[in-house]
Amino acid sequence: MKEPFKIIASGEGGQGVLSIAKIIAYAAWQQGFHTIYVPYFSTEKRGGVSVAFAQIWDKPIPFPKFHKADLWVALSQRAVDRIYDYLHDDTVTIVNSFLVKDVTRIKKWKPYEIDATTIAKEQLGKPRTFNMVIMGAMLKFVPGLSQEGFAKALEKTFKDKYERDASLRELNEQAFNIGHDLVK
């Protein structure tokens, strides 16, 4: 990579936005990359717009903040409206089309419109796993990261939850794999 790979995850509080960016940064770090993870969220516990920034590079990253993303994920309509200015001509965009109904403003970027909520509900019976579907799709665009690295990062991040309910591990893995297979 010539420059750090810059990622923005955005959505509503409670959708797992911060976890998505944190897991990506952790997976990259475990695979030998330098990473930075910067969460930003409003004061609401649920329902406020949450944004998380992550950077990955094979060298030390000089600045924690950036102005243009290489990969952007939007899990809600308000997130689209708020993050628009962070896009450049080559930004890869992924949206959860169940919650992002109007992509007119970002059509130029040819967003991957993935109905992750419906997929999670119909294929897994758990609509809340939509964020894992999205994360699986994201992996296709993050240079240098492996599916195994993501699996290890998921295991580390959700260790306590997995100990309380072992079925969550398989559910998250299934959702992640479905998302990964969606993007060709």
Image (cartoon, grey):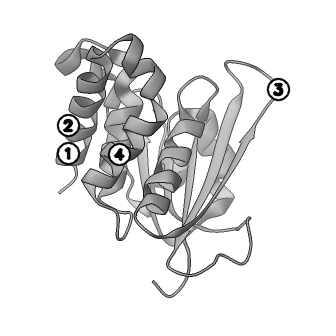
* Type of amino acid under label 3: Thr
* Type of amino acid under label 4: Lys
Mark closer to the chain start, 4 or 3: 3
Q: Would you place residue 65 above or below residue 82 in this image?
A: below
Q: Which mark is residue 182?
A: 1
* Closer-to-camera residue (89/172): 172
User: Which residue is identified by label 4?
Assistant: 152
* Closer-to-camera residue (130/29): 29
The residue furthest bottom is: 2
Dividing the image into 4 quarters, which one contains the N terminus? bottom left
- In percent of width and height, residue 83 lies at 65, 51
Mark 1–mark 3 Cα distance, whole angstroms, equals 34 Å
Quarter-of-image position of residue 153? top left
Label 1 residue SS: helix
User: Which residue is identified by label 2?
Assistant: 178
Q: Residue at x 61, y 39 (%)?
A: 79
User: Which residue is identified by label 3?
Assistant: 43
Q: Are marks 1 and 3 in contact (CB under 8 Å)?
A: no
Q: Are marks 2 and 1 in contact (CB under 8 Å)?
A: yes
Mark 2–mark 3 Cα distance, whole angstroms, equals 33 Å
Mark closer to the chain start, 1 or 4: 4
Give left or right: position of 31 versus 77: left
Mark 1–mark 4 Cα distance, whole angstroms, equals 21 Å
Front: mark 2 or 1: 2
- In percent of width and height, residue 134 lies at 37, 40
